[in-house]
Amino acid sequence: MTTDTGSRGAVVPDATGHFGVFGGRFAPEALMAALDELTREFEAAKNDPEFTGELDRLLAEYAGRPSLLTEARRFAEHAGGARVLLKREDLNHTGSHKINNVLGQALLTRRMGKRRVIAETGAGQHGVATATAAALLGLECTVYMGEVDTERQALNVARMRMLGAEVIPVRTGSRTLKDACNEAFRDWVASVDHTHYCIGSVMGPHPFPMMVRDFQRVIGVEARAQCLETTGRLPDAVVACVGGGSNAIGAFHAFIPDASVRLYGFEAGGEGVATGRHAATLVGGSLGVIHGMRTYLLQDDEGQTLETHSISAGLDYPGVGPEHAWLRDTGRAEYRAISDAEAMEAFALLCRTEGIIPAIESAHALAGALQVGRELGPDATIVVCLSGRGDKDMHTAAQFFGLMPGEEKRR
Amino acid sequence: MTVQTAFDKARAEGRAALVGYLPAGFPSVDGAVAAATAMVEAGCDVIEVGLPYTDPLMDGPTIQDAVHRALVGGARVADVFRTVEAVAATGAATLVMTYWNPVDRYGPDAFARDLKSAGGTGLITPDLTPEEAGPWLEASDAHGLDRVFLVALSSTDERLDKITRVCRGFVYAASLMGVTGARAAVDTGAPRLVERTRAVLDRQGSTLPVGLGLGVSNGAQAAEVAGFADGVIVGSAFIRRLLDAPDERAGVEAVRALAAELAEGVRGGR
């Protein structure tokens, strides 16, 4: 394979799922046959007009694609005067970019003759999207969610159950996204004959990082064309939040061959990377293996996974997709941490300047856009992936800002 | 003793070998050594010492519970080597069972060197397949260690061939689709998997033994498995005894009683 990141873009991953030294397939033997089958079916489906036609139809008629590119003029005044264009994944059906991937994988599930999907979820966005696609295609659905997350995202638990999914709170380990992944893998090892594990991010063993990227690529493909149409040129920067990294890869991928476009990923800095209470894997992690892939992760000196922290359930994960690790090491993309407080400030700012309530995950990208805008100056154009809407975060935001009736306002 | 010797001895006695698993540091570092020693005294031929890991995604609730307690108790890799040293001193062949990341972090060569010097005979690696095992194949060759990879009901014949070619010590057949944990019945696919694995080994001209694990919890099941496999692997059922006991001492005696029952089982299967 090549590490060329120039105008053509590199051909990654290679046939065994490696992005340079990252990625691969560190999975139990019991899953290897299913991963091989999935790789074959995905390759076949990509080249099958019936499959791609149905996916395109669902994306257009069901998910609402293409999503808008909205210029945020009042918000931009706080971003050094740079032009800020929001890629509105929040307007998709189910309220986030997750539906792009899930519709693809649900169609693949049906194509493979499987009758059940399982998923892990942090904020509940991927869980809701999976439950939605399962309802649409008549598949059984089980969603694993850390108990801590079921509490901070209770409304999404109700949404998933309303859609007919079984939601299983995971009570092991840190009781967040990482443990939900463990539990989903355990289910899959026992059910792989009839079940597809619909992984929600560009993580896990090959082919997941590649496949999920390909289903999310539509974000950047659309944004690139829309930006050209609106501004007559390419943006100077593309900005996204990174937990596992699916919306970021989706937003970045079409721009990778455009050398003039800077790519920035913003991770969850929690209470600050120096405090150890964060989830900024690419900023503060080290090389290792987790959930089937070689990547950067937050681990101690003996390879034990560290507990992570973020105000955003969807970014509260100790690993990151291997392609991001590769983009970081090759220098094609830059990754930084945004603290809880910075994210919430940007959250409030977008609400009040644009009348758009973002997901707290996406607020990390918005805070990043404020930084990047100030650095690049008023001539710059920045595309921000607004990966999801913030309705699910009202409880957290109301607590953070003291908005509940009877509470003193903190700001 | 090497794993091969332990299996050869059992084979010469016309029985299957008994392989017992316990994580280091559970119920305490010394408690695990005491329990493993009791297992050897009561008839276990091979001991697998588990390396406690935060994300044991091939393990069911019983082993998750035990390794969680071991980690909360402060278990470190050094404790794993100490445990291996103490267990190997009983004369039993002693392997370490571990997820890959702790070895990756330690450095595969350094891990192999320290395992060897503790008297360990090799590694069982549940989340490592030959495709990603390059550094471990090198390190285990350099230090003369066994490497036990898993085969599964879903493995194709092509994969069985690929996996068994890099196995040393024995081949670990995961007898059912699922995570670790005691089951009421041994999966009916198990004999077929052992048979298919043996057929592949025969074609290679290999006499590598095939051990069968995941689900065995009593003497009758051990006897059943001993009827078709070279080794019977038991883990969760031992841990269950330790978890259910009022104290460590009682737990060790309960483990000893189970090992004796299983040892009788592996002698009654043929």
Image (cartoon, rainbow, N blue to C red):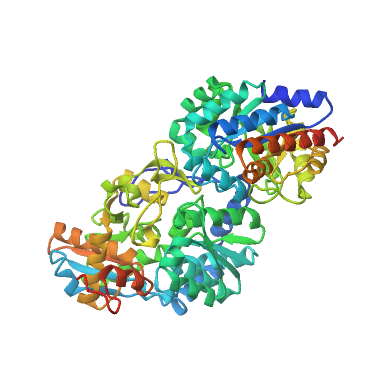
In this picture, residue B249 sits left or right of residue A101: right
Percent position of residue B262, x then y? 77, 37
Percent position of residue B267, x then y? 83, 32
- B144 or A61: nearer the eye? B144
Q: Is residue A185 above or below residue B190?
A: below
Q: Is residue A91 above or below residue A46?
A: below
At horizontal 66% and vertical 48% (from top left) the residue drawn is: B181
In this picture, residue A3 sits left or right of residue B40: left
At horizontal 70% and vertical 24% (from top left) the residue drawn is: B4
In this picture, residue A123 sits left or right of residue A55: left
Q: Is residue A332 above or below residue A349?
A: above
In this picture, residue A46 sits left or right of residue A8: right
The C terminus of chain B sits in image quarter = top right
The N terminus of chain B sits in image quarter = top right
At horizontal 50% and vertical 57% (from top left) the residue drawn is: A180
Percent position of residue B78, x then y? 48, 29
